[in-house]
Amino acid sequence: MSEEELKDQESQEEPLTEEEPVAFSCESCNEAITGWKRALADYENLKKDLMKERVAIRSAAKEDVAEELIAVLDNFDQAAKFQPSELSKEAETWAMGLMHVRNQLESVMTDLGLSPFGESGDVFDPTRHEAAAERSEDDKPDQTILEVAARGWKLSDKIVRPAKVVINNLN
């Protein structure tokens, strides 16, 4: 048969639709089709499982990187707390450059999906905060955060590191 005759024959055949199941008289044909459908369903399930696994691996990798970056950012924050008040013009420019690097690092962390939490005045939540110390201040409500020793970080809804805080304990 020539190519033109094959094309004519193919165009004359009606395509099968899913509404019209094909009836085969041969039992082995039906078994083969059933097996093929099972294999196709298994393959689709495998693709879904692999996609979930990839997402879980990416999330775990982000969390591992986040823990390392948080430690570096904490070091920047500690260094900033002890910056001398009187610096030469060159040293002041150098310190500003370091703070710019710190801000870039924090920006990278937010791009990864991390967000900081824990601020003075918030209510202490033991699922999100770690009490580093307690003080009593009568002018503030009980169990509020007076000071943040280290910010907490979360990745989506998962707490990567709880905030270390000083809480008001009036009891």
Image (tube, rainbow, N blue to C red):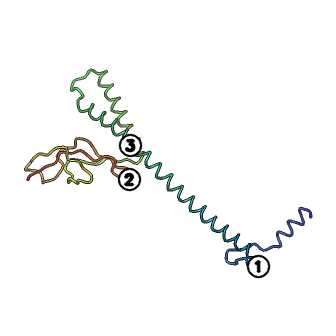
| Quadrant of the snapshot with the N terminus | bottom right
Q: How crowded is mark 3: few (under 14 residues within 10 Å), some or many (20 or more)?
A: many
- Residue at the image position 34 percent from the left and 29 percent from the top: 98
Q: Residue 9 carries which label?
A: none
Instruction: Tell which of 15 and 53 is nearer to you.
Output: 53
Instruction: Tell which of 89 and 121 is nearer to you.
Output: 121
Of the image marks 3 and 2, the number of the one nearer the N terminus: 3
For label 3, the residue is 66
What count of labels does the image hold? Answer: 3
Q: Residues within 10 Å of mark 2 (few under 14, many from 20)?
A: few
Quadrant for residue 75, please give it.
top left
Give the Cα separation between the discs numbered 3 and 2.
12 Å
Residue 85, how many percent across, how many down? Answer: 21, 26
Q: What residue type is labelled 1?
A: Ser
For label 1, the residue is 25
Residue 37, how many percent across, how many down? Answer: 65, 68
Q: What element carries label 2?
A: loop
Q: What element carries label 3?
A: helix
Residue 59, how many percent across, how many down? Answer: 44, 49
Instruction: Tell which of 128 and 113 is nearer to you.
Output: 128
> Would you say 27 lies left or right of 146 here?
right
> Would you say 81 lies left or right of 18 here?
left
Q: What residue type is labelled 2?
A: Ser
Q: Residue 156 carries which label?
A: 2
Rendered position, 15 above or below 157 = below
> Would you say 106 lies left or right of 127 here?
right
> Would you say 39 lies left or right of 75 here?
right
